[in-house]
Every structure is written in C-alpha cells, then in structure tokens.
Image: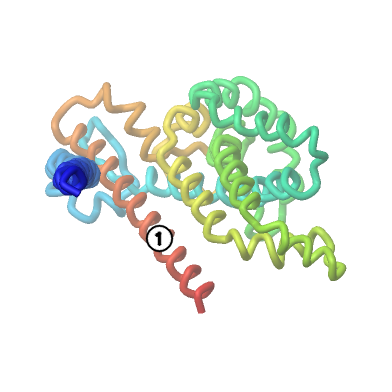
Amino acid sequence: MSAVQEAMPAARGSRDATVRRFALTDAIFRALTKGAAILVLVLLGGVAISLIAGSWPALSTFGLSFVGSEAWNPVTEKFGALAPIYGTIITSAIAIVIAVPIGIGIAVFLTELCPRPLRRPIGMAVELLAGIPSIIYGIWGLFVFAPFLQTTVQPFIIWMFHGVPGLNSLFAGPPYGIGLLTSAMILAIMILPFITSITKDVFDTVPSVLKESAYGIGCTTWEVTRRVVIPYTRVGIMGGVMLALGRALGETMAVTFVIGNAHRISASLFAPATTISATIANEFTEAVGDLYTSSLVALGLILFIITFIILAIARYMLLRIDSRAGA
C-alpha cells in the first residue's frame, strides 16, 4: 500500500504537468491565430488609409465630379473616372455572363456525363488554363484572337444586326478587333477555370444517394442536375462565381493588351475603351505632377470600393440562400 500511495502523487504531478503543457500550447495557438486575423484587418485598413491619403488631392480638387466626368486630359489636368469605371463594370459583367453557363456546363459534363477515363485529363486541361500568366492571354488576344474577330466575327455581326433598332448601335462601328467585347471574351476565358473547378468540386460533394434516388424514379440527367445537384450546391456555385468576378474586376495585363485604352464611353461593344486597372498600369509610370498621380490613386480607391461592395452583396446573397435553405 505504501508503494501505491507514493506513486499516486507522482502520477498526479505528471498529469498536472501534461494539462499545463496542453493549456500553454492551446493559449499560444489561440494567440497566433488571433494575431493572424488582426494582421489581416490591419493590412486591409492600411491599404484603405493609404489609398484615401494618396487620392485626397484629386478628390478635394474635383469632388464628386471626378466620378461622373468622362474627361481625362493630363495636359490641362482635367481628370474623370467615369470611362474607366464603365469599362471595368461592362467587361466584368459580360465575362461573367459568358463564363458562368459554360463553366457550369463543363462541370456537369465532368461529373455526370464524361466517361471515367477522360475525366482526369479533361479536368487537368481545364485547371491548367488557370496557371497561364495573364500576359500570355494578352499577347494571344492581341496577335491571334483580335485579328480573327476583326476579319471574321465582327464584320458578320455588324452586317447581321444592321438596321435592327438597339442592336445596331450595340454592335456598331468599324471592326477594330480590339475593344470592350474582345477584352470581355478574354476575361471570360481567364475566369472559366475558376468557375469550372469550384463548381466541379462542389458537385462532387452531392451525396450519391440523392442522385441515385432521382434516377431511380425516372429523372433524366437534366432533371437531376436542375432539381438536385444545383440546388444542393448553389452556395458553392455562388462562391465560385464571386471569386471569378473578383478576378475579372482586377485583371490588368490581359485587358490592357486588347481593350484599346481609350478614355471614352461608347454604346458599341466593338469600340475601344479602358478599365481602372488598365489605366493605372498604362499611365502610372508616366504620371507627372501630384494631381495626375493622385487621380490614378483615386482610381485605385474606386476599384477597391467597387470590389468591397460586390463582395458585400455576394455575402448577403449567400446569407439569404442559407436562410432559405434552413427554412
């Protein structure tokens, strides 16, 4: 009995030491993760403050007219952000409209229709598109894609919609090859791998029993996809679309090559235009004077705000989808 009694305090001390060690490591881990989260907020706040400080001379000089003006003349120091904002929003919207149905269609094919031996090669080919540098897309778009559109597609579209009210102005003008529509199509190709990969991954999370039950009662592949797969994974699909939209809004080099870099707003999608990122990339190294530089920084601030608003809207939509699913 004495030996057992002597061993008990030693065992209790060893257990207490282990508990204290676990508590210390847990406290360190909690502090590190909390510090990482705070660091993200600090960096985000630092970026916002630096953009506001750098753009203040332009904002104080032009006021709200900076956002509503199309003028961009470095010689007379008259600057407005309306044309870059218009080009950024239009190209990103068109790219999403083109890429989302194609990306979801590829994901459906890979998960539901593609023969199993071909799934991995096709999936890897799609994912490799995401690894191509954006400048390569820009060079390809300028020297291959834009000339093809200029000589074949754009003349045909102009002829087809000639005389059609509304569409004749939307697809008017000489076929330059470069312009809003060309840059939007390049963006669609660039964001397609993101939408496809994320959609395919979330489609794979659908329980097999749900799809097998639907097939068992006689549903077709279209019905299973529409009634079972997409409703079950709509939150993941929306997340992939928002990630692709964020990539499209901030893309610089590929768009700079093929958009034409013209500070004007035109109703035609074939007309040259510009975006916020393309304007900053083209002119920042040539900016002479504090007001010119501040105007470019103000464009960066506007892009920051646009991205924040879109992400906030996306988050709100995801919360609405979750609440409906819970109800």
Q: Is residue 84 above or below residue 123?
A: below
Q: Type of residue at label 1?
A: Arg
Q: Residue at x 59, y 51 (%)?
A: 202
Residue 301 point in image, percent of width and height: 25, 45
Residue 238 point in image, percent of width and height: 52, 56
258 left or right of 22?
right
- SS type, badge 1: helix
Q: Residue at x 13, y 44 (%)?
A: 56
163 left or right of 134?
right
Image quadrant where residue 198 sits:
top right
Q: Residue at x 62, y 36 (%)?
A: 174
305 left or right of 224?
left
Image quadrant where residue 181 sits:
top right
- Taking depth in this image into account, of 172 and 154 the one nearest to the observer is 154
Q: Residue at x 80, y 33 (%)?
A: 117
The residue positioned farthest toward the front in the image shown: 1
Residue 113 point in image, percent of width and height: 80, 47
Characterize the local packing of mark 1: few (<14), some (14-19) or many (20 or more) Cα atoms within 10 angstroms. some
- Taking depth in this image into account, of 251 and 112 the one nearest to the observer is 112
Residue 326 point in image, percent of width and height: 50, 74
Label count reads: 1
The residue positioned farthest toward the bottom in the image shown: 327
Residue linked to disc 1: 315
- Taking depth in this image into account, of 200 and 294 the one nearest to the observer is 200
